[in-house]
Amino acid sequence: MENFVTRLKHFASRAKEFWSNTTLNQRVLFCGALLLTVIVIIVLLTGSRTGDFVTLYTELDDRDAAAITEKLEEYRVSYQFADNGRTILVPYNEKHEARLKLASEDLPRGPVGFEIFQESSFGETQEDKRVKYQMALQGELERTIQSLNKINSARVHLVIPEPTLFSDREEFPSASVTVRVRDHNTLNKSEVKGIVNLVANSIEKLDPENVVVVDQNANILSDPLDSMESSSDMLKVQAAMKRQVEREKQQAIQSMLDKTLGPDNAVVRVNAELNFDQREQLDERYFHDPDGRFIRSEELIEESGEQTTPAQQGIPGVDENVPEYLEEEGENGYSSYESSHTTRNYEINRTETITTYSVGDIKYDYLTVAVLVNNEVADQAFLGADNQERADSIRGIVATAAGLRENRENENVLLDDNIAVTFMDFYTEPEEDIVEATFMEELLRSPYTPWFILGLIITILIMVWLLARRRKVDDESLTETNQFETVVEEEINIDDIIDKNLTPEEKERQKVKQEVDKIIDQDPDNAAQVIKTWLSED
C-alpha cells in the first residue's frame, strides 16, 4: 500500500512538472478539449433521453385509449402504441406535461363510479336510475379491487333482482368478478376470500356463496372450499407441530452425542407421531367411608288417635221382626292406636374425575430414533468393550434425551425396538495436495492488483504520450536544423550582388573571368598553357 501511495505521489509530481513545462497555449488547448468532451457527452446523453419514448399509461381500455390519443393529437404530442394498443408511449421530455394536461381532462376515466349521477337527463325513469346505480356499484367495486397490490385490472358484474312484496318469490343477488393478476403473481385462498367478502358486504343481501371470482385464464378461484381449506390448514398445523417435536428431540440428542463423541461424528434422525384426537374422560368411583355412614336425609312419621265402636244391634232379617222377650242392650266399644315410620337416606362416597387430553401429545409407542455413529470415534470414546455394549450405552443416552422409558403405564415401549444404533465408517473427503502458490499467483490474488494494473496502464499511456510528444519536438528541431544547414551550405556569391550594378558588357567580361578562374582552379597546367598561347598570339 505504501509503494502504491509513493508511486501515486511520484505520478502527481510528474504530472505537475509536465503541467508547469507546458506553455499557455498548450494549457488553453488542453482545457478546451476537456471541456468540449464533457459538453459532447452531456449533449449525447440528453439527446438520447429526449428521443426515447417512455410509457405514459398502461392497461387502457379502448374507450380511454381513443380519448387519450385524440387529446395527444390536439396537444401536438407524438405518441406510439404498444401491447396491442393497451399501452401508450410518449417522448421522455413530454411525459409529465402530457399527464398533467390529461388529468385536467379527467383522463383516463377508467370504470364509471358514482360520478355518473352528476349528469342527469330529462325524462329519466326509475328503471334508468336503478340501472345507473348498478353500473356505479360495479365501477366502484372495480376501482377498489384494482387498488390491490397483485391485481392489474378487474371487472365486476352484478345481478340485483327487483324487490318484491312476496317473500316466497324473493330472489337473492349474485356477483361475478374477473381479475387479471400482475406478472408472476397468484392469489391465495385468503386473498380470494377477501375479495369475495368485499363484494358480498358491498351489496345488500348478497351471500358470499353467490360470488364467483375468475382469473384471466378462466380458472375459478372462489370454489366453496372453506371446509377443505380449514382441514388443509389443520393438516399444515399438525405437520408443523410434528416437525417441531422431531426437531426438538433431534437437537437434544444431537447435542449430547456431540459432547460425547465430538462434532460431526454422529447423525440423529427422529420420527414422532402425535395424538391429535380431542378426548375427555370421566371416571366415577364409589367407596365406603371408614369413619361411618353419613346420613344424607331422614324422614320421621308418627300417628296416634282414639276410636269408639257402637254396640251390636242385631242381625237384619225376619227373626228380628218377630216379637220376643226383650233383653238388655250391650255397651259401646272404645279403642286407641299409635304408629311411627322412619326413612333415612345414607350418602355413598363418590369420586368423579374428568380428564381432558391435550391435542398433540406424543405417542411414545411410535417414537423412533435412528443413530449413526462414526466407527473410528466409537472405539476411542470408552463406551464399552464391544459394539453391543457401546450401542446399549448410546441407547440409554438417547432414551434419556428423548424421554423414552420402558414399563410406563399405558405405553408399550421397548428401547431396542424404538432406538436403532449403527456403527459405520463416515465418508471423509480426500485431502487435496497443497501446492504452494507462486509469486505471480499471490500477486494476482492480492486485492491491490487491480489498482496496480490500472496505475500501470495509466503510466504506460502517459509515457507513450510523452515519448510521442518528445519525438515530435525532436522531429521539429531536426527539420529546423536541416533547413538551417541547407541555407548555410548554399554558396553566397558576392559577385551576384555586385553584378546587379554592372552593364551587360561588364557582366560578360566578368563571366569570362569567372570561367577562367574556374578552369585555373580545376586544371592549373592547362590553364597555364592556354595563357602562354594567348600571349604568343598577342
Image (cartoon, rainbow, N blue to C red):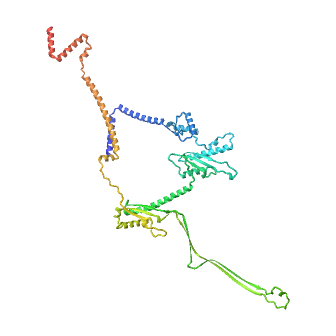
Classify residue 368 by image quadrant: bottom left
Q: Position of residue 5 (x, y in %)?
A: 33, 44
Q: Is residue 78 above or below residue 139?
A: above
Residue extending furthest top? 538
Residue extending furthest right? 323
Looking at the picture, tell me which residue is in the foreground, 172 or 126.
Answer: 172
Q: Position of residue 228 (x, y in %)?
A: 55, 56
Looking at the picture, tell me which residue is in the foreground, 535 or 76.
Answer: 76
Q: Is residue 399 above or below residue 121?
A: below
Residue extending furthest front? 318
Q: Residue at x 49, y 60 (%)?
A: 241
Residue 209 falls left or right of residue 441: right
Q: State how many labels appear.
A: 0
Q: Position of residue 261 (x, y in %)?
A: 37, 62
Q: Residue at x 54, y 51 (%)?
A: 191
Q: Which residue is drawn at 47% across and 69% down?
A: 408
Classify residue 420 by image quadrant: bottom left
Looking at the picture, tell me which residue is in the foreground, 466 or 387.
Answer: 387
**Quick check: can you spot residue 4?**
yes
- For the C terminus, the quadrant is top left
Q: In this view, does 120 lie above or below 502?
A: below
Q: Residue at x 32, y 39 (%)?
A: 459
Q: Position of residue 386 (x, y in %)?
A: 35, 67
**Quick check: can you spot residue 400?**
no
